[in-house]
Image (cartoon, rainbow, N blue to C red):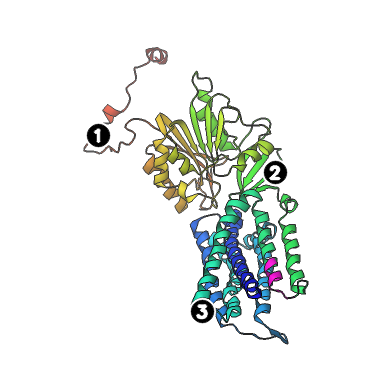
Amino acid sequence: MIKFNRTLLLFIVIIIEGYVVLSTELLAIRQTIPFVGSGTDTVSIIIAAVLMPLAFGYYFGGRWRPKRFMGKLLTVRKKLILNIIISAFILLVGMSYTLLNGFFITLINLDLTNRIALTTVYSLLFLVVPVYLLGQTIPLVSNFFTSEKLSAITGRMLFFSTVGSFMGAVFSTLVLMATIGVHYTVCVNFILMAILVTLLSKKKTSEMVLVSYTLVVCAFFLNSTSALSTFNIVENNKYNTISVFRDKQGMRNMSINNNASSRYNDAGRKHEYIEFIERIAIDPIRNEEKPRDILVIGAGAFTFGHEDGFHHYDYVDIDKALRKVAEEYILKSRLKDNKTFYPIPARAYLTKTKKKYDLIMLDAFLGDLTIPEHLVTVEFFAQVKEHLKEKGVVIANFGSSPNFLSPFSRHLDNTFRTAFPHISRHVVLEKYKIWDDDPGYAANSIYIYRNQPDNDSDELYTDNKNRIFYDKPHSKPNYRQLKKAQ
């Protein structure tokens, strides 16, 4: 019975370690989004910063033997506890938004602004060592199974470690982040590490146990709702970190992952590009007899068309929390009955619906860090085009270089024109810096396409073949104007 309890305890240790490592990886990806974005490039760096240290942890953990450390014998049990405590200390900074914010701002003030470099520095400082130390858990724990068959016990340890990783991947994201939020999901990891220290300690009131629970208290303090409120954060879920604040002009602003998303006031003022799009697309059809169908991909704070109670609006955005935040903090009112919100991914919505629209607005591009890579492809734009009615209009807002100085602005322009030929492009700026040479200088670039018959024509005028006489519109002369001119 004693042997069974000891074996069960060791497998519990392995499960918890697997959970913590995988959960830490996912939390690192999520917590860095407001600072480095969510592209596959940054995600791949974080994954690499977990996998390689984990492999080295397995290797060196298997080679480790008890030795004297600071005048005392460092046993396998003490080594396991020390590894967890050190990992918890480092992760306290690397997983807490309040400390991460200061870390990234410091690097940016030192002119380290490249997102790949920022992610690399973060990973080296806050992921490599903790994962390496936690990775030693399985080989170190194997020392307690000396009487078991090597192949059988190795298989069991790998099985339970994988079960822990599975739970860390699924339970932490689908359950914890969705219910208690990202910041408290971080705290759960520290609770689990404190439990590991307690299980491994012979004396349950030892200094290491007290230290581990002190770190839990610190984690709750740094990730509490009150701590996040100092950054005006009102929502921190698996998709977004959302903050709201009033600016000097009294506008209510919503920021998503540190990018300006929406602004509004009681007079109905909004972002300049939103007002521009409403002026050219919504104002001319406000007094029509039959309502139009309008799709908005990238809901933000639902400011686009907010005052319009006539036309049918469908808003699509992956984060269901946006509606509650928008109604409570930005709009100060509920969405009208003619507006429907679908909290699902944009491409999933377009795949499942057969509905066609008179107007589709693409506004899911928040700054240069949080550009959804799957929403800037020819395939996605083709999906959008399939849901246009005849003579329907697509309007897309991209934050890009107005002078096409960056590769992104040029390649995006090429991609959009491939799916939507014959478009117009408008740069919404108070001052268009036409002579500016900074490729990082970005503005709201509005692309407009109307779904017309023969819109895909690629005919050219040449010296040899020129049919401009037949193509250009021939309007009747205005004889009254001619008489006045004479």
Badge 1 density bin: few <14, some 14–19, many ≥20, Cα 10 Å: few
| SS under mark 1 | loop
Q: Is residue 191 above or below residue 380?
A: below
Asked whether residue 35 appears in the rendered view, the answer is no
Q: Earlier in the sequence, mark 3 or mark 2?
A: 3
Q: Which residue is mark 2?
A: 245
Mark 3 and mark 2: span between their CA atoms? 59 Å
Q: Which residue is mark 1?
A: 466
| SS under mark 2 | strand
Mark 3 and mark 1: span between their CA atoms? 83 Å
- Assess whether mark 1 and mark 3 are in contact (beta carbons under 8 angstroms): no
Of circles 3 and 1, the one toward us is 3
Residue 333, horizontal then vertical, whole percent:
67, 32
* Amino acid type shown at disc 3: Leu
- Assess whether mark 2 and mark 1 are in contact (beta carbons under 8 angstroms): no
Quadrant occupied by the N terminus: bottom right
